[in-house]
Amino acid sequence: MATTGKLTLTTFVTLDGVMQAPGAPEEDPSGNFKQGGWLVPYFAPDMGEIVDKAFAQADAFLLGRRTYDIFAAYWPRVTDPKNAVAAALNRLPKYVASRTLAKADWHNSTVIRGDVAREVAELKRRHPREIQVHGSGDLVQTLLTNDLVDEYRLWLFPVVLGTGKKLFASGSVPAALQLVTSNTTSTGVVVSNYRRAGKPTYGSFALDPA
């Protein structure tokens, strides 16, 4: 039997669930969001080590249009062969989900415009290891609505913003998750990996009737 890959989602998120514009104010100011760049004060070298290990597992990347444009403007300029993130992103296949992008010029990039669920199934057949999603807030909502994520890598930052696009927005498919690993960085960021574990189960603490 052929080995199929898995779709992993890596997301930086605040304590109140915001994932919008973690790296810079100009990343995504939509909705009049003025708190972009909230991740930067928490960056530390030990975070880079975790990221490098994760990128070493990638076979391909699936990105939304906005994240693809940000990555394509930055990572091709990083040419140090010892930079594990740049080496993976610049070499491996990249699939950008967009109905408006005419072409993708970054090396080894393909625009996908079809049904996302069907495309993800095809990517899993094509790539036996991980198809990694990073950022890509709008694409993530489609993936969650269609229950397509196999593993979540959530970076939980000790900050509350009060506004901004949420990771688990209304419409996410109910799902139970199993914690696989959890680490805390030197700046208090909790990095947890979860796998899908079927549907939620329910119970009650109510007392039985007398």
Image: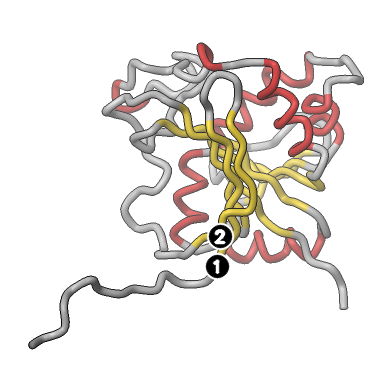
The residue at which mark 1 appears reads as 197
User: Which residue is painted at 54% across and 41% down in the image?
Assistant: 154
Task: Looking at the image, tell me whether mark 2 or mark 1 is earlier in sequence order.
Answer: 2
Secondary structure under tag 2 reads strand
Of the pair 59 and 109, the residue shown nearer to us? 59
User: Which residue is painted at 52% across and 71% down in the image?
Assistant: 198
Tell me where residue 35 sits by quadrant. Answer: top left
On screen, residue 127 versus residue 209, left or right, reads right
The quarter of the image holding the C terminus is: bottom left
Q: Answer yes or no: do the residues labelled 2 and 1 have beta carbons within 8 Å?
A: yes
Identify whether 77 is placed above or below 149: above
- Residue 12 in view: yes
On screen, residue 67 versus residue 51, left or right, reads left
- Residue 115 in view: no
The quarter of the image holding the N terminus is: bottom right
The residue at which mark 2 appears reads as 178
